[in-house]
Image (cartoon, rainbow, N blue to C red):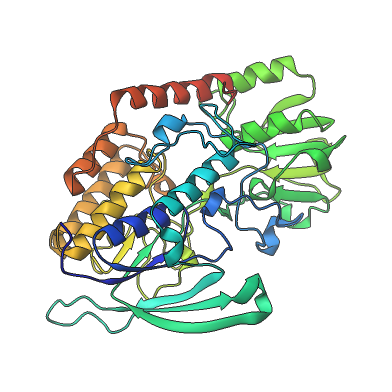
Amino acid sequence: MVSSKKKKVCVVGAGVSGLVSARELRREGHDVTVMEQSGGVGGQWLYDPRTDGDDPRRGRRAQGSIYASLRLNTPRESMGFSDFPFFPSNDGAGVDARRYPVHGEFLRYIRDFCDAFGLMDVVRFNTKILHVGPLAPRGHDGGVPRWTVRCSSRRGGCEGDAVTAEEVFDAVVVAVGQHNQPRLPAINGMDKWSRRQLHSHSYRAPDSFKDQVVVVVGCRPSGTDIALELREAARDVHISVKSMDDGVTVFPGMRQAVSRHHNLHLHLQANRLLVRGRAGGVRRRLLHCRRRHHLLHRVRLLVPVPGHGRSGHRHRRRQPYKHTFPPALAPALSFVGVPKRVVVPRFYEAQAMWVAQVLSGRRTLPPEAEMARAAEEYNRAREAAGVPKRLTHDIFDLEYCDAFGETRCGFPRLEDRKKELLWSSVKSISRCHGELP
């Protein structure tokens, strides 16, 4: 049953979390506008052949960070929305029916999802958010403020034809994703490095590295995938890692690959670059494969942003309640898609359903003080468990994902068969350095 409390809602971003937010909000009868800065839906899954050039410190041109050969590392059975399975498409050429398909297959699925639920009608493409702020401060009566959203729209994708406008909304759902702001390591001499360097955000294919000597900084999934691919084109690939002994930093499969290939080498983390372009005797190319920052800063708010202080570094103050609602501004402001290492897109679907039902009045939130207290207790528990602050929103707990959706909005639990497939893929990644069937 749809509530009569219809709200005018702005959703920021047309990636997976933004699109499912739009669908759930419309199901609850809300008036929805999705603002997307690129020219298509899909967010990170919208492949962009452009890169940021040879110096990641000079700002970004490319939004996406998908490289050409990327395949999903979780099975398609668990990658679908609860009521829209991720089946192989039947449109003929280019279909990848494998359990772990290429990135283009998932983008096709996202577009099919949009078409099935008529979401293209509510998306404004080439529209960049410039500012989001409360129209008026919260009153003494506890009333929730409305929101002013200022945006710049580009006609035909041309920067020169940008038009700036402001619009007022009852609520804002921030669904900007996680992975397209590169996080660079602090290495002495990096500012004087005269050779080519780039972040994995800008990596697309190994062709331009032919016969080069490359240093790959980082050995998590993206670093592992890219190093193994570069090995086929580069003369030598040297992988810089934090530790060689903990059994976690370097996947067992990567150690096996190093033992098999003469041009693949492991080294302890580089801490200095020399002006001549040498790092431990290695020269030519430097490729950073580190985690990316959350993109919450893409929306400049006149309110505290979850997990970000004035310095821009993550911390655990002012965290949102259940990763979704900032206590002082709920329910008019919410975040969908912040948690990592969850069942995607199902967890974001549950978040979106909860937000939509709260805005329509079908569900209620605890008092502000209780939400703030719960968020603080969560932070203290993470600290006590030794979880680094930068991993505040990393969950990696299937039971938590199930309980979240079930208790917040009656979202169905993930079937046991799909959980088994997920665990199998996690073990495969750890054991076999990402070689999937």
* For residue 420, side relative to residue 120 (left or right): left
In the picture shown, does residue 241 fall above or below 316?
above
Apparent side of residue 347 relative to residue 143 in the rendered image (left or right) = right
Above-or-below relation of 232 to 408: above
Judge whether residue 246 can be spotted in this image. no
Q: Is residue 176 left or right of residue 39?
A: left
Residue drawn 67% across and 36% down?
69
The N terminus - image quarter: bottom left
Q: Position of residue 206 (x, y in %)?
A: 77, 38
Q: Residue 398 location, x and y as percent?
A: 31, 32
Task: Please tell me in which quadrant of the rendered image residue 94 appears.
Answer: top right
The residue positioned 16% from the left and 59% from the top of the image is 365
Q: Residue at x 60, y 58 (%)?
A: 63
Image quadrant holding the C terminus, namely: top right
Q: Between 267 and 20, which is closer to the camera in this rendering?
A: 20
Residue 428 lies, with reference to residue 27, above or below; the image says above
| Position in image of residue 171 (x %, y %) | 30, 71
Quick check: can you spot residue 137?
yes
